[in-house]
Amino acid sequence: MTNRCRRCGREIPQGGLFYHVKLSAVSGYDGIINQDHEADVTAIIEEISERTPGELEKDVYFEQEAILCSPCRTAVVETFCGQLEIDGNHGKNRGDLLH
């Protein structure tokens, strides 16, 4: 079975180097309920009713996986880290990061 890079379309032969890349975004909760939001319950319900179940689900949980070749993996990781201003090394980034 050969794989194909999702980014550039390059065919990766059997035994060739490739990466499984996963992006997930999961909503967070710090245990605090903002009192200002409780007054707008009607507006929140109206906003929810105008959205599809898929859109609502993506607000809570989003995950995608892709196979990338080595050069595309490097480009994707560098772009991700660059846009978030992180260096990609565990334990050496700002305190707002999980990993």
Image: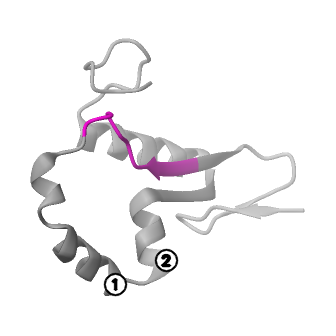
Quadrant of image for the N terminus: bottom right
Residue at image coords 61%, 53%: 68
Q: Mark on residue 49?
A: 1
**Judging from the image, what secondary structure is the residue with disc 2 in?**
helix
Residue 30 within the segment the image draws in magenta: yes
Q: Position of residue 87 (x, y in %)?
A: 33, 25
**Judging from the image, what secondary structure is the residue with disc 1 in?**
helix
Q: Mark on residue 54?
A: 2
Write the start and end of the magenta stretch as one range: 22-32
Q: CA distance from mark 1 to mark 2?
A: 12 Å
Q: Position of residue 9 (x, y in %)?
A: 61, 69
User: Considering only order in the chain, which callout, 2 or 1, is on the residue closer to the N terminus?
Assistant: 1
Quadrant of image for the C terminus: top left
Q: Residues within 10 Å of mark 1 (few under 14, many from 20)?
A: few
Q: Residue furthest top?
A: 91
Residue at image coords 23%, 33%: 85
